[in-house]
Amino acid sequence: MGNEFLPLLYSFHFYLFGLISIAAAIAFVTRKSPVAAAMWLVVTMFALAALYVMMDAQFIGVMQVLVYAGAIMVVFLFVVMLLNLGHPSELSDIRGKWGRIIAGFLGLALLAEIMTLTRSPLELKLVVPAIAVSVNSTGGIIGGVAGPLFREYLLAFELTSILLLVAIAGAVVLGRKRSAN
Amino acid sequence: MMLQEPVVTGHPLADTVAQYVWLLPVLPLIGFLLNGALSMKAAAKLGPNDPSAADHGHHGSASAGVHDADHDDAHISHDDHPVVRHKYAGLVSLIGPGVLLLSFGLAVAIFFAMRSVDMAQPYVDTLFRWMPVSDMKINVALQLDPLSMVMVLVITGIGTLIHIFSVGYMQDDPGYPRYFAYLNLFVFFMLLLVLGANYPVMFVGWEGVGLCSYLLIGFWFSDKANADAGKKAFIVNRIGDFGFLIAMFLLFANTGALDFAGIAANIDKLPVGGAVVTAICLFFFLGCTGKSAQIPLYIWLPDAMAGPTPVSALIHAATMVTAGVYLIARSSLLFSLAPVASLTVALVGGLTALFAATIGLKQWDIKKVLAYSTVSQLGYMFVGVGVGAYTAGVFHLVTHAFFKALLFLGSGSVIFAMHAAYHATHNHADDAQDMRNMGGLKKHMPVTWVLMWIATLAIAGIPVFSGFVSKDAILGAVFERAQGSTLANASLLGIPGSTLLYAVYAFGLAAALLTAIYMTRMMLYTFHGPNRTGADAESHLHEAPWIMTGPLVVLGLLSAVGGWLNLPEFLPLGPTGVFDKWLEPVVGASTARIAAGGGALAGSTEQALIGTAVAIAVAGIAFAFVRLKPAALVPKKDSPPSFGFAKVLENKYYVDEAYDKAIVQPVVNGSKYILWKGVDVGIIDGLFVNGSALLARALGWIGSQLQSGQIGTYAWVLVLGVIALLGAFVRVH
Amino acid sequence: MLAEALALSGVLFVIGVIGVLTRRNAIIVFMSVELMLNAVNLSFVAFSKLYGATGQVFVIFVMTVAAAEAAVGLAIIISIFRHQETVNLKDINLLRG
């Protein structure tokens, strides 16, 4: 395989995974069954993980598979099944025809705006973070992420750990069956 | 704007004692702060549980208002209470008159420095910048020139004497430090008024003296009548102050300057006899009618006699009420450009002089007589400055300060004695200020008697006494202007100026006659004839202590020989026209402009005028002696009510009642039925208050309908919001 | 590359929005929000290829928040289901004032 094919192969895979993710996302929002929807969302996440890897964010891609597609979506599925929501007798939860049409137009309007804005010349300071982070290639794949995470963003990192702790406590409190009821 | 910068550099006064001119007002201000602090300290320490406050109610906290007041002043002490002086009385007696004495000493030093230099230009000392707003650069600046020097000497000189008198007069008053604090504050503001180098600073002083006047009229505020008199003075003065303000605005709008030097430099912007300068002068004169108690705003001054008598002497006779005269003399440049306004001033002054004199004929309260006399004499001063005889007007201001302060302090001395006598005999019923209750006091108070006669002769215009010289100068000037001047050529309301001036001259003569009569009447009823106090009280009548008679003697001397300051040429007892020459740099040009077109009076005419004036004065005194029978007078409680024209005069032409019906009641009713019940209850409460509550409730109802609790709806609204927000960004880029 | 990635990110985000707007099942709405978060992550990663690793750091933060949100959100949904026997948003108006 010659090197001249590499960009072509790259582009091919990029568009392939992009189309897969869009198709799976559309399938996700249109499925009646929550279980099917969840499965399609997992497909989207896998496709995104592939794109992450292609964009030199291998660590994020791994995280996407392990945490998102693996852990979070499993929790979703677990809850869906726990509540027995996939029952066919359940009425469709999708809105009526007019609701869908208006939602479609709103979505198109939003998309148009997003496209316009992402193509408009923004000031560089709005794009590049104020904290100058050097691209560290010596630390390998993980080191490139870990460097800024544990240096410039250490405080934010610690705060997220507190957030997770609070979330755990909250989930436990909310999920506990009250004896009074 | 260069004009508003100080002209200190190069002025011959720059390196003399005059550089301490700022100390003149600051010294009384320090006195105010110290006395005020002592007053508050004393008041703070006395509580309701304080034994001394409980035992001697009205000797306790002054500001707490525990004071069972009589209807007249000179509250020496009350029967069953031992006399307890204020705990800080000694200190206050030192500070109060002390700062005035220092200020007077400084004024004298500056006066001598000024005498030895050329005062063609005023000396302006800029203390600090006050209102630097765009083109308007107003500094707090003091101006020394011959005119302000005269005023400063009068204020600090007479002020010192009256402060010293007050030490005796007010010695047992529970509000002793408060009294001196107010008095010192008054002197501070009065000095600011006459020293200010621009109208805004002058206005601060103008308002400040009004405040102090209010505070001191209502000094014994626990008595409602006194507090009401203070409010009346304050409110009536507000009307005049409005005129002062409008005049300032007009002046700035048309000349771009508010300081005296700047106005003089820009005077070309005001056309001679133009509507603008006439309006400015008339609005200034409106301010004068308020502060100096002229028709139609004179009504507050007689009521102002509710204050302590030394206050009446200092504020309501010698200094503050003459501020209007000072204002016109200070603005002589403007008034000389507005013949119509000057004519108005002269006419109103002449009318007031006559009108107030007629009321003075039938007053029984000794202070009321003097109050109307003051209004009348102020009228003379306005006649003087109105006809452009600025030096004569200001000179009458000075001599009037001498003899009227003497008359008031003398009456204070009489009231003091009457009070003491009534106090000793436990008499609460009789009025210590009513002349019907006096009589025959000359053998008990010979010093006061002699001195008050000197003042009476002075005010009546008997030759050689000070009042003769100044009053005659004014009347002579009126006659001279009537014969030919810019005023005689102008006209007011279609009446030619010369006719008006002859009328003013006639008013002046008539007022002079009445002045001689009512002053003699006052003297006869007070000091001559049999005593009507009653046998018990008579034995307690005695002369006031030296601290009160001392200032009287000084004032008596000044009243007698004050005329020497400005001897007319026909009376060459010394150098003539000293005062005229002194004020020449300030008002000379204005006087010349008004007098243009006329000549000095012929010697024979002048002698005839003087002869007439003297004859009238003598006739008035003689008439009073012949017609009035002090022996036939009975005490107030036995007096029959008067009838006919006498009753009209006794009730002051019912002017207060007419104002009440024409102005006060409509305002009260309008406020009550239109503003309160209509605007306030109907529109404000109904429409605005309840209406806005209704509106808020309606909006709240609409808002609550949006809160459906449906998360789906919220999501839709949220997305719409995001689209709108991003849409705004799209448009920006 | 960046432009395409951003376009893809925008499309996925809008699909998530439409999901939120058209579905009434609380869990599917929730998952739509997750899709929106993923779309944002994609743009972060795309930017990080140009401007350094900071974008990836933010992706980690977003994932953490998403995990926390999932835990708490699902706990709430379970809690509501216990009371109402439904997760249909039409029938849930506990926020009504």
Image: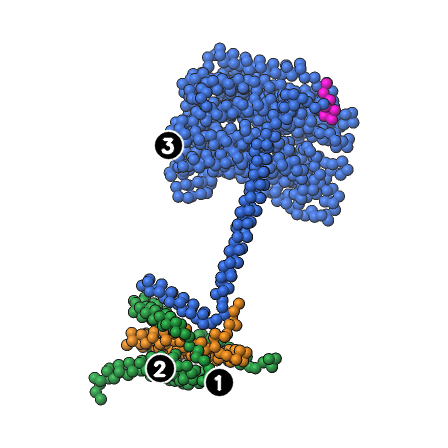
Chain colours: A green, B blue, C orange
- In this rendering, the answer to whether B401 lies above or below B215 is above
Where's residue B671, x and y in %? 57, 40
Where's residue B535, x and y in %? 78, 25
Name the amino acid, label 3. Answer: Lys
Residue matched to label 1: A84
- Farthest right residue? B536
Locate the C terminus of chain B by quadrant: bottom left
Locate the N terminus of chain B by quadrant: top left
- In this rendering, the answer to whether C55 lies above or below B87 is below
Going 32% across and 82% down the picture, which residue do you hit? A20
- The one of B725 and C69 positioned closer to us in this rendering: B725
Query: Dot 3 lies on which element?
Result: helix
- Farthest bottom residue? A1
Sort mark 3 into few (<14), some (14-19) or many (20+) by Cα contacts within 10 Å.
few
Name the amino acid, label 1. Answer: Asn
Location of residue B76 by image quarter: top right
- The one of B413 and A100 positioned closer to us in this rendering: A100
Name the amino acid, label 2. Answer: Ala
Looking at the rendered image, the disc whose residue lies closer to the viewer, 2 or 1, is 1
Tell me which chain the residue with mark 3 is part of: B
Sort mark 1 into few (<14), some (14-19) or many (20+) by Cα contacts within 10 Å.
few
Where's residue B69, x and y in %? 70, 37
> Alpha-carbon distance for marks 2 and 3?
88 Å
Sort mark 2 into few (<14), some (14-19) or many (20+) by Cα contacts within 10 Å.
many
> Alpha-carbon distance for marks 1 and 3?
97 Å
Going 46% across and 12% down the picture, which residue do you hit? B602
Q: How many marks?
A: 3
Residue B269 tag number: 3
